[in-house]
Image: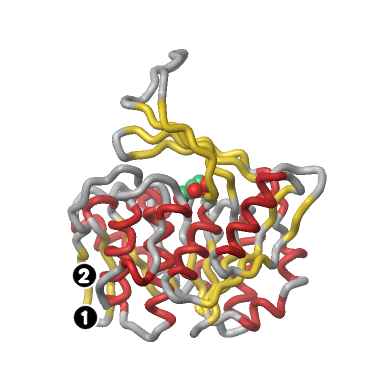
Amino acid sequence: MKNILVVGSMNMDLSIEVDRAPKIGETLVGHGFSTAPGGKGANQAIAAARLGGNVRFLGAVGKDSYGTQLTENLKKNNIAYEGAVLENTTTGIAMITVCNGNNFILLDSGANDCVTPAMLEGKKDLFSWADFVILQLEIPMDAVLCAAKLGSEFGAKVLLNPAPYKPLPDELFPYLDYLIPNEHEASDIVGFAIETDADAENAIEALLAKGIKNVVITLGDKGCVYKDETGIRFQAAEKVKAIDTTAAGDTFIGALVSKLCEGKDMQSAVQYATHASAVTVTRRGAADSIPFASELEMV
Ligand code: RIB
């Protein structure tokens, strides 16, 4: 089993469902409130672990009850928590509104903002242990850059999910073996809208030209597009009734990495990741909605 290091965020997700988006200044009655583990980093770590990876997690939580619940939840999912528990800050919070299967997320980063290059430099043993390093953008950019450099220096494959989008420094690109944006993030990076298949192809070529080795652009319920040795490929999403799309992208990434770690090619890994995220959207919540390998009947 290959070793996967996730460097990233942990949030407690406070979710509520509504039947329509509220207007500015309106108080709208919702239903189905829940408090449950989330954060893009932790969700991706849980997906990778549930789908076959040997996972360790590096991030930060506050010394509070949410922090304890989140680190306990990682342990329950067989993930070693190698991060900090900090006084004088709070655990990250995500306020999630789920509306007709889609979501809107507001973040208070809290301890996630305290992940620093110095903290990562002090954990070089984890980077030398890792075969794969997974990163997102809910921690500061200087920490992301440092983690990408360390992963690359120690010979691990480095994957970045650029969510939520922030401008990326040019020096980051050559360290990236995989970039997995959604169409909006990809569009922000390349500077043009992605509305057609041709736009998606052009975006992939523009990203590869920056020195990134592999790019997969996810397209929500349309599927994804990527390039392998045979050229540009489109993978359709499975048709399912989406109840809550929270963590669908995170599941895709954890599942993709777990298959790449098994030595599968991009096409098989993308098909498996597409199937895993289709299961996630049929369930409520973030980490709790991610399937186990035994629930997926393919590859
Ligand atoms: O990708 C979904 C995640 O985004 C949620 O779990 C929330 O915490 C935010 O980070």
Where 102 sits versus 54, above or below? Answer: above
Where 62 sits versus 251, above or below? Answer: above
Q: Position of residue 148 (x, y in %)?
A: 58, 70
Q: Amino acid at mark 1?
A: Thr
Q: Which mark is residue 230?
A: 1
Q: Position of residue 37 (x, y in %)?
A: 54, 49
Which residue is tagged 2? 233
Q: Amino acid at mark 2?
A: Arg
Viewer-closest of 99 and 147: 99
- Whether residue 138 is visible, yes or no, is yes
At 48% from the left and 54% from the top, the residue drawn is 287
Query: Is residue 47 found left or right of 137 in the rendered image?
Result: left
Where 220 sits versus 291, above or below? Answer: above
Q: Are discs 2 and 1 less than 8 Å apart at CB?
A: yes
Q: Which mark is residue 263?
A: none
- Whether residue 164 is visible, yes or no, is no
At 39% from the left and 18% from the top, the residue drawn is 23
Q: Position of residue 120 (x, y in %)?
A: 71, 67
**Cα distance between the residues tagged 2 and 1:** 8 Å
Quadrant placement of the C terminus:
bottom left
Viewer-closest of 138 and 102: 102
Q: Position of residue 243 (x, y in %)?
A: 30, 43
Where 217 sits versus 258, above or below? Answer: above
At 35% from the left and 71% from the top, the residue drawn is 294
Query: Is residue 8 found left or right of 43 in the rendered image?
Result: right
